[in-house]
Amino acid sequence: MDDLDRALVTLLTDGVPLQARPFRTLGDRLGIDEAEVLLRISRLRDERVIGKLGAVIDARKIGYRSTLVAMKFSKDRLEEGIRIIHDQPAVNYCCERQHDINLWFTVVSPAKYPVEDCVHHLHRISGSEKTLMMPVLKRYKSDSEQRWNFFREVGKEENLQASRQEYIQEESLLNGEEKAIIQDLQQGFLLTDTPFRRLAGRLGMPEAKILGMVRSLIQRGYLKKIGAFLNRKKSDEAKVLTVWQIPEEKQDEIGNKISMVREVGQCTARPSYAEFPYTLYVMIEGKDSFACEMVSREIEKKIGKWPRLTLALRKEFKKSYVPYFSEELDLWWDKMQKEEPWDEKRRNPLRLQVITKS
């Protein structure tokens, strides 16, 4: 990377200009022409400096919730459990970790469908012996938040008491055309001289209207910006999840200290359980697992000795995204509700419980 590349990456992470020729505007700022901007972005993607170019969407604002879930399977049931969880459209990430609680995944849910019900349903159909729901309680650091925050303000507590109706109301303020724009931009932003014109052509709307609606979505907070997602981790580097058992009164102090470590990609507070008493979840990046362990030891010098556990990644089985406003997901939820009626008693995330085999 040369100085122009670095300057271009900075501009892309700030967000592309909402103009008919956004890459020409970027070129004017850098003193190069539009064609060179496009070539440089293409090369930076090939070199994995940046990943997808697309919209940064506030999932909660558009009416979606998500949670991390961990399940325990016996060795003879694990393969079948992986297959079942992998095939669910509400699951966008799934992996095996080296622990008694061995299958870890994330669930993404429209607010009109309670995520707690989804977790109970997946527990039942998978045959899990034990299931732990681990929503984020507070974020201290998110991937690439030095450049911009993909989710919400770092350090902000998640509002678990917010009602589903609040999220449903937010989504209801979006019209069909706005949802179509979000769906399209979620898939990526075209690397061409007139990307908004191409978007307008696909959606059958005038380019000026598309630009106006994108600006409105950003002003109202549904979109953060359209920009480049940085690849923090090279393909041959390790990414290790380490969890610490920190008492609640010390979490903010220690979470903020950990977030200052350069090799830390994420740091979040999540619920603790008797079966799994860890509260701070830290994603550490390094050239290999040994380097990540050295980072953990350096962190201990800063925060003191607390119980910690490294959850080594054995294998990733799914790494994708859940399309927003998806008809497939709606059909899946309708089917699930018929099989297992909703239960209001299990919908308060402040009364999280370990789900076990009945």
Image: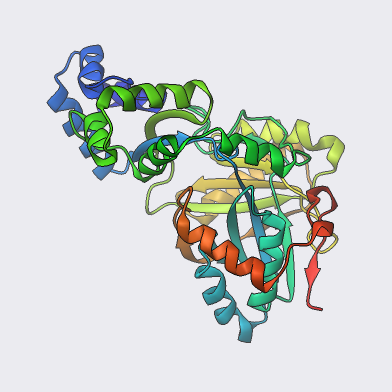
**Residue 129: % across, % down:** 74, 76
Examine the image and state in which quarter residue 42 appears: top left
Q: How many marks?
A: 0
User: Quick one: 312 or 196, which is closer to the camera?
Assistant: 196
Residue 45 found in image quarter: top left
Is residue 93 visible to the viewer in this orientation of the structure? no
Q: Is residue 190 left or right of residue 108?
A: left
- Residue appearing at x 70%, y 44% in the figure: 164
Residue positioned 57% across, 38% down in the render:
171
Looking at the rendered image, the quarter that the C terminus falls into is bottom right
The answer to whether any part of residue 320 appears in the image is yes
> Horizontal and vertical percent for residue 101?
69, 68
Determine the residue positioned at 46% across, 27% down.
Answer: 217
Residue 55 locus on image (x, y percent): 41, 35
Q: Quadrant of residue 80?
A: bottom right
At a point 70% along the width and 41% down the height, the residue shown is 165
| Nearest to the observer: residue 134 or residue 206 | 206
The residue lying toward the viewer, choosing from 304 and 30, is: 30
- Quarter occupied by the N terminus: top left
Name the side, left or right, on which 67 lies relative to 306. left
